[in-house]
Amino acid sequence: MSARSTTEGGARVIEAGRPPERYARGWHCLGLAEQFKDGEPHEIEAFGTKLVVFQAAESGRLHVLNAFCPHMGGNLAHGTVKGDAVACPFHDWRWGGDGKCAGIPYAHRVPPRARTRAWRTLEENKQLFVWHDPQGAPPPEGVTIPRIEGAFSDEWSDWTWHSLRVDGANCREIVDNVVDMAHFFYVHNSFPTYFKNVFEGHVATQYMNSAPRTDMTAADTVASAGDLRSDASYYGPSYMIDHIWVEQDGATVETVLINCHYPVSPDSFVLMYGAIVKKLPGMTDEMAAAAAAETSQGLATGFEEDVAIWRNKTRIDNPLLCDQDGPVYQLRRWYEQFYVDAEDVRPEMTDRFEFEIDTERAVQVWKAEVEENLARRAAADAATAGEK
Ligand code: FES
Ligand SMILES: [Fe+2]
């Protein structure tokens, strides 16, 4: 990022750089906890390797181990859960949730140091998380996943959940969205009117208000039909909680969205998202579930719009920014804290940083564009009517 002004005969030269070879330090969500509680081992491809997730039959706890068995390399995700251990499909060695070999049925004794890697886990918000740290340290004090009360309340719907593998892009692309106001208008057909970022410690927040696009029909956009307020925070490198309030038909619809991912390799990741919706007075469970499904469908379309951009763009370490762009470089500095050794985290990566975009110019131009689109559509409608 140092040579921002690289030019070739005056033309800016893009520095694509290289995606980092290591994976971020932090809690990574692997999905809804429930999906792993079916008595089967589950394979997860993440952090350049494979993991096995299984539920201990007696304790009921979820465990995450390296998928490859240290004996002869068998894949535990293709094995069986036996008691509180996962049994390898190759020679039936049993591995407990603590990573210790819990038994070898055909042997006199278990080699005393027989152990595989057990990953630190956390169940919160009805989701399962693993802690990844290339240096092997536990999470620092205060670095955890905040509890979302709605996830445990009857007044809210259950989670909807979707996952999508994105190949050919490093997960930094999705994090860049935190500061990118303009793409909400051009990519997602919404109309931001207020946009502010705050970064502090391991949390990066985006505050946004947006209005509906009156030039868009429901078929053109999944953006909300009413004024929307969104407070979205990344807690660490990969788990975002987004609180959304939408004014709709005289009521405020409250939603919590999760937008999270885990890296598969330096240039692929699994993106997951889900929503819960607070029931309005008189709303049945079915209606709440339908509202959550609808929100989730909107999210799905929104992410597809992003993914289409990521799949076709280049990685760029030296973006050429204008005065209406958000603090991309500061966000990337914040994000860098998860990729360097803990002792190399510098104050400028974690110190509080605030930036509010002055949206006056953008709002004025976008209003004009919306009016032009409306006028064009009215003229086209009138022409069609005239032909009849
Ligand atoms: S490879 Fe797993 S038991 Fe032999
Ligand atoms: Fe986006």
Image (spheres, grey):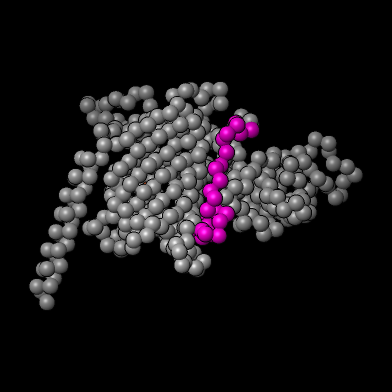
Labels in figure, total: 0
In the foreground, 256 or 19: 256
At horizontal 44% and vertical 48% (from top left) the residue drawn is 243
In the foreground, 283 or 378: 283
Q: Residue furthest front?
A: 281
Q: Is residue 139 magenta?
A: yes
Residue 125 on image: x %, y %: 57, 50
- Left or right, residue 353 beside residue 346: left
Residue 111 on image: x %, y %: 83, 38
Q: Which is the main secondary structure of the residues drawn in magenta?
A: loop
Q: Quadrant of residue 331?
A: top left
Q: Is any part of residue 57 visible from this angle? A: yes
Residue 4 on image: x %, y %: 32, 26
At horizontal 29% and vertical 30% (from top left) the residue drawn is 13
In the foreground, 105 or 58: 58
Q: Is residue 70 magenta?
A: no
Q: Is residue 307 above or below residue 139?
A: below
At horizontal 60% and vertical 39% (from top left) the residue drawn is 131
* Quadrant into which the N terminus falls: top left
Residue 9 on image: x %, y %: 22, 26
* Quadrant into which the C terminus falls: bottom left
Q: Which residues are magenta?
A: 138-163
At horizontal 14% and vertical 63% (from top left) the residue drawn is 378
- Left or right, residue 66 beside residue 162: right
Q: Is any part of residue 189 visible from this angle? A: no
In the foreground, 348 or 316: 348
Q: Residue furthest left?
A: 386
- Left or right, residue 150 beside residue 179: right
Q: Residue furthest bottom?
A: 388
